[in-house]
Amino acid sequence: MTEKIITTKSSDITSTIFGSYDSNVRMLEDTFSVKIFNRSSDIDLGDTIHVTGENSSMVDKAAEAIEYMKKMAALNENLSEQSVNYVIDMVNEGKGSELEALDDDCVCVTVKGKPIKAKTIGQKKYVDAIKNNTIVLGIGPAGTGKTFLAVAMAVKALREKEVSRIILTRPAVEAGERLGFLPGDLQSKIDPYLRPLYDALYEMLGAENCARHMERLTIEIAPLAYMRGRTLDDSFIILDEAQNTTPEQMKMFLTRLGYNSKAVVTGDLTQTDLPFGKKSGLAAAEKILDGIEDIKIHKFTEKDVVRHKLVQKIILAYEKYEREKIRERDFKSDAKFKIKKMGGKKI
């Protein structure tokens, strides 16, 4: 039997590590086949968490995971199920040391006083890329915080007077549906397409404050078509759902950049709603802009998903399905080529 002992500074940190009804440690116990319990000691010494098990390497991994959870708890982080799963995955893959990069660096504070921080290494690298580059392409699956973190960085830049306005835009492309003629004036017609951007802004600034900024034109939300012909100086510009742009639209957007401006382009190449046969401008930009100084292409993975744990599984299932389709298509193509080569005779 192997045992590891981790000391915590307070019972509050210990309770955060254990989670509601010990849900966090149960996940660790199930994953690493160990037993975890705590003992309260002298108030000056804090608590001790004991990890025991037959397999010493599994005990080491569980103890390593608890050490990182302890650091997150000390930063007043809420250890959600997603956070614990993320730590477990990183430790299992031998990448636990990368978790050191997650610190107390607050991106922005919401209108309710909640601090917005990077929750994964991918998110941390994305935030750093936005800080250090003029143009950033954030590419990855749904739920990775691409748009939310970009809006948080934009609000931070506006509050700190690094820019004088925020411009949010996205192509008005229907998600595989035909909605027909929408009622109301032009603003009413385009608002449904821009709703996710409003939601992010309302969380950061509040609805009333956001409305005041929009009246003063310090915040502008508009469809991509409205960007043509403009030069955007002293601005933080976000192009959302960029997978639904054409290469021509993407070029048009990127060439709007003016002095003292920053642009973030976000999109998921697996969820393109363009008509059949139309190439995505985001896919083209990923290849064309790669390697250019002051432009960073950041790719998220399913591990950066911070929504329900099922979202990760759904993304992986679709990726597997697409790989199998490509493999089947390649096999059929190869078989047809061989038949043709044999003069039409089947092999």
Image (tube, rainbow, N blue to C red):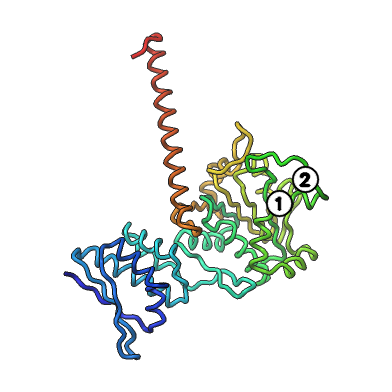
Picture coordinates of residue 30 (x, y %)? 30, 62
Residue under numbered circle 1:
192
As drawn, 238 above or below 104 = above
Picture coordinates of residue 239 (x, y %)? 64, 52
Q: Residues within 10 Å of mark 1 (few under 14, many from 20)?
A: few
- The residue nearer to you, when weighing 25 against 337, is 25
Res 214 → quadrant: bottom right
Residue under numbered circle 2:
182
Name the quadrant of the N terminus. Answer: bottom left
| Residue name at image x 59 percent, y 57 percent | 147
The kind of residue on which mark 1 rests is Pro
Q: Residue 103 carries which label?
A: none
- The residue nearer to you, when weighing 95 against 187, is 187
As drawn, 227 above or below 61 = above
Label 1 and label 2: CA atoms lie apart by 10 Å
Is 69 left or right of 282, judged from the image as shown?
left
| Residue name at image x 37 percent, y 9 percent | 345
* Extreme-left residue of the structure: 1
| Circle 1 SS class | helix
* Extreme-right residue of the structure: 185
Res 37 → quadrant: bottom left
Is 270 left or right of 166, judged from the image as shown?
left
Picture coordinates of residue 117 (x, y %)? 52, 68
The answer to whether the residue labelled 1 contacts the one labelled 2, judged by CB atoms less than 8 Å apart, is: yes
**Disc with the residue nearer the chain's start (1 vs 2):** 2
Name the quadrant of the C terminus. Answer: top left
Task: Report how many numbered discs are placed on residues in the image.
Answer: 2
Picture coordinates of residue 132 (x, y %)? 55, 62
- The residue nearer to you, when weighing 262 against 211, is 211
- The residue nearer to you, when weighing 296 against 239, is 239
